[in-house]
Image (tube, coloured by chain):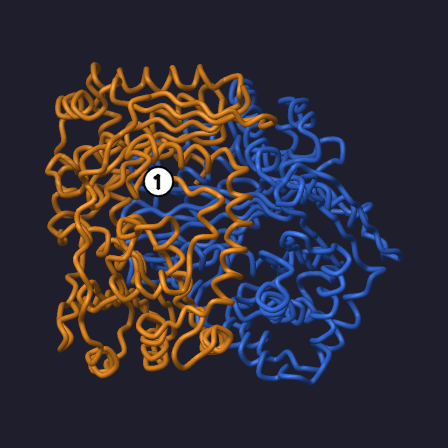
Chain colours: A blue, B orange
């Protein structure tokens, strides 16, 4: 059970505080409700590029990192389809420096041409390192536009084309800031060695004076129901062929999300997951195989991906995946399997919540979903999944007209 | 409220890190056990460490394969049963074989302590190394290996170790495809019999420790006999390669992977804490000189870092980055330039203050919570050191002078000693 207090400043900034006196540190997490789904299709990658720019200095502070390091702090950030999330840990006696830094860059960034140009290069190198210079690195780039035709999830967070990054100008950056970075579009969570009163006082002092802004309203095109299976085969110079297969699911805030989370754990949670047991250990068709949900806020995807063993027939591999998924509808051992993944979910939740950083990030994200208290009820929601719900979810979502597949084929001679 | 002065609030010195002492006792068969009580949740971490790393192997892949096969079937359980039980009790099992040591780590809710110890005993002392499981594992590992060898990072680090420690030393030896065909169950049981013994073993436990832990450990592990042999010292074979610059051509890659470094002192040496500070200034954190110059100033890379690592028989320092092919030489020139600056120009007071405070904060993070505590304990203990090593490090962070840093950079970063490995398309 994670106890927390919550308050909202007049400018709309939401603040969550969880006290844990067993640590000398405080974690501060700031979530901005903006991700790559909020980008213009002709300027993709801007949300993530912007995350980089947030470290290049703000209105009154020329350099973000140095003052934080000077007080013993450490920080980082990530961007995904839905959110941009900044986090730090700092020795508790120096938490006010964290407030000073974060409030200044919420107030206004220092929009410098030099920083923009450098970070365009850094992001291009990040794209090269993650997607182009890794075997199988471009699979996900091919998969998204196959599964999504209109929703912005069709492009990856880093951007669908590096030309978009190169063409971004300072005016676009400024306008992005003022339409998305605002106290009324952010959630702060403070966890660790901090009292509620101090958290309230400092939030009021540093963030209170920042005025509410007009945040760009979100009017995303919803993805029409898929009616036909889509398949793309690509050839690459990689050692083994691989399969990437996805199915559309509902939004994050639904019971089905938890049911399907449990389903993917039955399939691939741990060494005893059914896909691994049957297809890696049993039939030896794959060298590795995994299944998971994208956990997006808007309707996301189930992803099953695996690399084939030498000489395995692609069709046989696909059929075997289907057989394993269908096995979830049978009585055989399912109750025991469900109890197993529920136990594992419970223990991994306990482990995840031993870290103040995880607690801060989870509290912020649950608040964005509608209620920070979700952090304390997820285990129960997951435990409440019944066998009937599993069978219904498998029948509803795992159908071929709802799926997209990338066959990633090795051009090498078998060895 | 609106006349708030947006200037940095007072900077308080980072409080001294409090490091709890581990409680020590021995099982009746002599196995040392260290208990670190910490944390607020009812969870535990248990690590079983053996001197069973790569340094002990006569054949490539032997140490890692033996370690991975521990959970592939035991006297009383098949691999499938073992995996099901671990998952059923929500236990997380990590197996690993490093250069010097190997073992397993388990994370679990402390109410399951008895089950965890019983399964650990099966895994550690009664593995049966079934042939079908071994064959299947080696086929899988070959696929993973082939994929990894597509990555410029993997090729670079493998070559780096070969250059530093020599082709024939276990620290430097590179695995080749045919190595995946050479292992048999009897090689594995032999390696296991010699190295996974109570004489070679230690146990580190942290978390909210179940009060039956000591009693159960003795009950479950004390009747396991000793044995094991002391393997002869391999250090006489350690010989760095003569050629300092190696380029591996990997056509079609858009970035070049760079590794620059050499062997150096390890934790047991009294200069090591000072070298840690020097390494941080050079490339050990986001505000380091390499990061500022090569990423934040020039935008050549997504990341660049330097680190120093300790091995039982040696130690090494390495600067790592991936850069676009066209900026590779410029990056290397800048790296060497930064080292020369550290050898000749005293670090200014302001930068010293930043690195001192950043590292002091880092020390708080190194001892925050039961998992971090256990890892930090282990990484000193492995070198025969105790918490006094960390107290010396904390002291050095506060007191090191710019002159000492110049001296350390001249002693330990001789440009002529550095190996330079690059992998990318020409």
Judged from this view, the residue extending furthest toward the right is A227
- x and y percent of residue A356 in the render? 39, 57
Image-quadrant location for residue B139: bottom right
Residue A176 in the image: above or below residue B389: above
Question: Image point 34% across, 66% down: which residue?
Answer: B189
Q: Is residue B320 left or right of residue A163?
A: left
Q: Which residue is mark 1?
A: B173
Residue A231 in the image: above or below residue B168: below
- x and y percent of residue A54 in the render? 51, 33
The chain to which mark 1 is attached is B
Q: Is residue A411 left or right of residue A23?
A: right
- x and y percent of residue B358 in the render? 28, 38
- Mark 1 secondary-structure assignment: loop
Q: Looking at this view, is B353 or B281 the one in front?
A: B281
Q: Looking at this view, is B16 or B135 the one in front?
A: B135
Q: Looking at this view, is A193 or B23 the one in front?
A: B23
Question: Image point 30% across, 68% down: which residue?
Answer: B46
Quarter that holds the N terminus of chain B: top left
**Numbered label tally:** 1
- x and y percent of residue A259 in the render? 66, 72
The answer, for residue B18, to whether it is visible in the render is: no
Q: Is residue A373 left or right of residue A39?
A: left
Image-quadrant location for residue B103: bottom left
The answer, for residue A105, to whether it is visible in the render is: yes
Image-quadrant location for residue B268: top left
Quarter that holds the C terminus of chain B: top right
Mark 1, other Cα within 10 Å: few <14 / some 14–19 / many ≥20: some
């Amino acid at each position: 059970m994670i106890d927390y207090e919550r308050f909202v400043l007049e400018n709309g900034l939401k603040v969550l505080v969880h006290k844990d006196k067993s640590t000398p540190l405080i974690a501060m997490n700031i979530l901005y409700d903006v991700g790559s789904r909020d980008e213009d299709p002709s300027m993709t990658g801007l949300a993530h590029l912007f995350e980089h720019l947030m470290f290049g200095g703000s209105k009154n502070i020329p350099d973000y990192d140095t003052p934080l390091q000077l007080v013993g702090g450490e920080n980082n950030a990530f961007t995904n389809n839905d959110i941009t999330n900044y986090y730090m840990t700092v020795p508790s006696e120096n938490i006010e420096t964290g407030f000073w830094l974060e409030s200044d860059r919420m107030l206004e960034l220092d929009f410098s041409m030099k920083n923009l140009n450098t970070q365009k290069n850094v992001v291009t190198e990040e794209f090269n390192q993650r997607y182009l210079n890794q075997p199988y690195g471009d699979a996900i780039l091919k998969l998204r536009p196959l599964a999504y035709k209109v929703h912005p999830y069709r492009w990856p967070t880093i951007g669908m084309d590096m030309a978009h990054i190169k063409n971004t100008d300072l005016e676009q950056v400024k306008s992005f800031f003022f339409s998305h970075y605002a106290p009324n579009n952010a959630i702060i969570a403070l966890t660790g060695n901090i009292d509620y009163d101090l958290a309230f006082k400092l939030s009021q002092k540093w963030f209170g004076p920042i005025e509410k802004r007009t945040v760009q309203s979100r009017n995303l095109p919803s993805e029409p129901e898929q009616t036909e299976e889509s398949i793309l085969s690509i050839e690459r110079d990689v050692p083994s062929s691989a399969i990437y297969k996805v199915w559309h699911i509902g939004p994050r805030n639904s019971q089905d999300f938890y049911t399907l989370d449990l389903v993917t754990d039955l399939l691939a949670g741990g060494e005893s997951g059914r896909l691994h047991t049957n297809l890696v250990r049993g039939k030896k068709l794959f060298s590795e195989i995994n299944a998971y949900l994208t956990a997006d806020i808007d309707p996301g995807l189930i992803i099953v991906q695996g690399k084939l063993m030498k000489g395995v027939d692609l069709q046989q591999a696909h059929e075997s995946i289907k057989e394993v998924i269908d096995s979830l509808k049978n009585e055989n051992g399912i109750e025991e399997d469900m109890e197993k993944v529920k136990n594992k979910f419970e223990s991994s939740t306990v482990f995840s919540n031993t870290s103040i950083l995880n607690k801060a990030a989870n509290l912020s994200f649950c608040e964005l979903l509608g209620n920070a208290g979700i952090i304390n009820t997820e285990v129960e929601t997951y435990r409440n999944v019944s066998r009937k719900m599993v069978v219904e979810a498998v029948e509803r979502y795992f159908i071929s007209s709802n799926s997209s597949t990338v066959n990633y084929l090795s051009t090498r001679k078998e060895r | 409220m609106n006349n708030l002065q947006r200037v940095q609030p007072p900077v308080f010195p980072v409080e001294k890190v409090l490091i709890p002492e581990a409680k020590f006792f021995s099982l009746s068969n002599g196995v040392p056990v260290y208990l670190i009580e910490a944390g607020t949740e009812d969870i535990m971490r248990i690590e079983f460490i053996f001197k069973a790393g790569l340094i002990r192997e006569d054949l490539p892949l032997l140490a890692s394969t033996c370690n991975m096969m521990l959970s592939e079937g035991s006297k009383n359980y098949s691999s499938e049963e073992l995996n099901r039980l671990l998952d059923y009790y929500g236990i997380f099992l990590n197996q690993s074989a490093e250069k010097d040591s190997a073992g397993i780590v388990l994370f679990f809710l402390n109410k399951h302590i008895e089950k965890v110890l019983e399964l650990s005993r099966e895994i550690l002392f009664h593995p049966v190394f079934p042939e079908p499981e071994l064959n299947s594992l080696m086929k899988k590992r070959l696929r993973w290996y082939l994929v990894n060898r597509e990555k410029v990072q993997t090729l670079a680090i493998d070559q780096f170790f070969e250059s530093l420690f020599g082709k024939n030393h276990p620290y430097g030896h590179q695995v080749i495809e045919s190595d995946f065909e050479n292992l048999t169950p009897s090689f594995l049981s032999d390696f296991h019999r010699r190295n996974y013994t109570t004489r070679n073993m230690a146990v580190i436990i942290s978390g909210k420790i179940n009060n039956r832990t000591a009693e159960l450990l003795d009950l479950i592990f004390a009747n396991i006999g000793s044995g094991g042999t002391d393997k002869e010292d391999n250090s006489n074979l350690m010989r760095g390669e003569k050629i300092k610059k190696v380029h591996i051509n990997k056509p079609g890659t858009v970035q070049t992977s760079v590794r620059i470094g050499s062997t150096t002192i390890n934790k047991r040496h009294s200069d090591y804490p000072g070298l840690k500070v020097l390494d941080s200034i050079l490339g050990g954190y986001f505000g380091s000189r390499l990061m500022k110059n090569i990423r934040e100033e020039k935008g050549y890379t997504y990341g660049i870092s330097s680190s120093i690592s300790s091995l039982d028989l040696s130690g090494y320092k390495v600067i790592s980055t991936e850069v676009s092919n066209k900026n590779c030489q410029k990056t290397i020139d800048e790296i060497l330039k930064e080292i020369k600056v550290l050898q000749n120009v005293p670090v200014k007071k302001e930068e010293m203050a930043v690195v001192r405070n950043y590292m002091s904060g880092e020390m708080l993070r190194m001892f925050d919570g039961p998992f971090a505590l256990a890892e930090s304990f282990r990484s000193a203990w492995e070198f025969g050191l105790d918490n006094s090593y960390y107290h010396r490090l904390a002291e050095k962070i506060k007191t090191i002078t710019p002159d000492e840093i110049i001296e350390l950079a001249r002693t330990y970063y001789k440009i002529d000693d550095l190996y330079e490995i690059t992998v990318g398309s020409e």
